[in-house]
């Protein structure tokens, strides 16, 4: 059995290795133009909605003190974020998808998704709904850890995506409040769950659940971004 410090080191190693996978390398291999951005932000909107659903299921199965931590996390996602004047991460995600695709809210919800992305969404929901709470929690929180710029070498998903945006895409996004909030806020979201490791991940079975949840979720993330990358790289400028 590992110490909690060793467990943290394992999780940090997992998220760094995640970016060395073929799917992640393919996803980040090309410049993100406006045309590609329309498909990307449609699917990112659905990714955001899937995260909200998964955290809701996780919250329902957790001990009360962990429910509080999750609500602190989700309140900025769904209610209000001080870094987004008058809005939340949800409103920012909706604004980006609406502006880039030209679709209204209902049309966004009903849009046809890339099959591999849809499969990943169902996979995440399955783990969140049907797993022991510790496994379910770390299946969701590992994605925050993978976006923590102090853990991931060369930065997490949000920073890596933002670096390769075309100037046209940047110009569109700069008019949307909170468009870059995940470039820096996911460190705080990731750190919020560290006390869970200290309190609950001290036994062999608990550590097994933590690592299994993290491993399965990162595999789904590779499925999501790998499928998205295959479609995006075929879209012309």
Image (tube, rainbow, N blue to C red):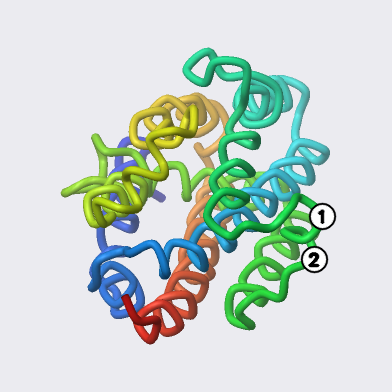
Is 57 situated left or right of 85 in this image? Answer: right
Q: Secondary structure at mark 1?
A: helix
Q: How many marks?
A: 2
The percent coordinates of residue 207 (x first, y second) are: 51, 49
Q: Residue 55: which disc?
A: none
Query: Is 135 left or right of 112, judged from the image as shown?
Result: left
Image-quadrant location for residue 13? bottom left
| Label 1 environment density (alpha carbons within 10 Å; few <14, some 14–19, many ≥20) | few
- As drawn, 16 above or below 68: below
Residue at the spot x=18%, y=48% of the render? 153
Q: Position of residue 114 (x, y in %)?
A: 60, 79
> How many C-alpha atoms fall within 10 Å of the one at disc 2: few (<14), some, or many (≥20)?
few
Q: Does the residue at mark 1 contact the one at mark 2 (Cβ under 8 Å)?
A: yes
Using residue 135 as the reference point, say whether residue 183 is left or right of it. Answer: left
Q: Which residue is situated farthest in the left direction here?
A: 154
Name the residue beneath numbered marker 1: 106
Q: Quadrant of residue 103?
A: bottom right
Q: Which residue is mark 2?
A: 110
* Residue found 69% across the figure and 50% down from its top: 49
Mark 2: secondary structure: helix
Q: Is residue 223 above or below residue 169?
A: below
The residue closer to the viewer here, 159 or 169, is 169
Task: Determine whether 64 is above or below 162 in the image.
Answer: above
The relative height of residue 237 versus residue 193 in the rendered view (above or below) is below
Q: Position of residue 120 (x, y in %)?
A: 61, 71
Work out how far the residue at label 1 is from the one at label 2, CA to CA, in angstroms: 6 Å
Q: Position of residue 173 (x, y in %)?
A: 41, 42
Q: Residue at x 27, y 38 (%)?
A: 149
Image quadrant containing the C terminus: bottom left
């Amino acid at each position: 059995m590992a110490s909690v410090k060793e467990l943290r080191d394992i999780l940090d190693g997992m998220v760094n290795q995640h970016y060395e996978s073929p799917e992640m390398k393919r996803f980040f291999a090309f410049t993100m133009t406006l045309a590609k951005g329309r498909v990307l932000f449609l699917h990112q909107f659905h990714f955001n909605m899937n995260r909200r659903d998964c955290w809701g299921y996780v919250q329902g199965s957790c001990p009360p003190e962990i429910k509080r931590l999750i609500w602190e996390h989700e309140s900025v996602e769904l209610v209000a974020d001080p870094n987004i004047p008058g809005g939340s991460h949800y409103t920012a995600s909706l604004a980006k998808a609406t502006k880039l695709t030209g679709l209204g809210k209902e049309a966004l919800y009903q849009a046809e998704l890339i099959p591999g992305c849809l499969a990943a969404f169902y996979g995440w929901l399955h783990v969140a709904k049907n797993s022991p709470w510790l496994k379910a929690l770390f299946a969701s929180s590992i994605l925050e850890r993978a976006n923590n710029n102090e853990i991931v070498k060369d930065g997490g998903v949000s920073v890596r995506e933002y670096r390769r945006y075309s100037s046209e895409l940047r110009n569109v996004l700069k008019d949307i409040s909170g468009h870059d909030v995940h470039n820096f806020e996911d460190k705080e979201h990731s750190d919020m769950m560290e006390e869970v490791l200290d309190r609950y991940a001290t036994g062999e079975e608990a550590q097994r659940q933590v690592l299994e949840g993290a491993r399965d979720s990162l595999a789904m993330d590779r499925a999501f971004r790998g499928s998205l990358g295959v479609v995006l790289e075929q879209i012309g400028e």
